[in-house]
Amino acid sequence: MEKKSFFKRTPVKILLVTLGFVVTIMLGCIPLTLVLSMYQKLSIRIIIAVAGGLWAIFTTIWLWARFDYTELWRTWAREMKVDKMMKLSEKFPEYQQLKEKYPAAISHHERHWRHKKKKVSNDLMVKMALEVPEEEWAAREEFILKNREERKAFREHRPPTLQDQNTIAGEKI
């Protein structure tokens, strides 16, 4: 895996965007503090204070949307998971060999244990995978690939009743 430059790393991006939020809010507070010492009508002071607050809020929302802040956090979580699995693969070379031989079956195994209600540690998940005999992994891989091909074939050759372009809306066959 190649090294990213410092500013391209996800945690750094998150930090910079978060600092952008803080700076924006602080700049939006400047009119609020200036209004306290102004000798103007109350209505003018309220307009200036509200404008500063609204600017801060809308600029923060724009930054959030522009840099897709929630997606940055999700990406970072995914990267940490991948790093953990890479370290685990280095720790258990047999597991890495299984992963190379039976990629679909191993990814199905990992997905299964990650989405259980009772979470299983990565070490335990790998140890359970290593306990399964090689023949079983071959059978699982074959089954998964066969099902994938059947689904693909069904998507390509659907019966006319399931194809939107060949039937008229509301038509019953």
Image (cartoon, rainbow, N blue to C red):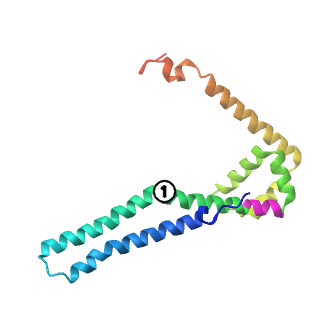
Residue that carries the numbered disc 1 in the rendered image: 68
Q: Residue at x 25, y 79 (%)?
A: 34
Quadrant housing residue 25: bottom left
Q: Residue furthest bottom?
A: 37
Q: Residue at x 23, y 72 (%)?
A: 49
Name the amino acid type tagged 1: Asp
In the image, is 87 to the left or to the right of 9?
Answer: right
Examine the rendered structure and indicate whether residue 42 appears above or below residue 145: below
Between residue 85 and residue 46, name the one nearer to us. 46
Q: Residue at x 27, y 75 (%)?
A: 31
Residue 123, horizontal then vertical, whole percent: 77, 64
Quadrant housing residue 153: top right
Q: Residue furthest top?
A: 173
Residue 173, horizontal then vertical, whole percent: 49, 15
Residue 124 seen in render: no
Question: Start and end of the magenta stretch?
Answer: 85-91
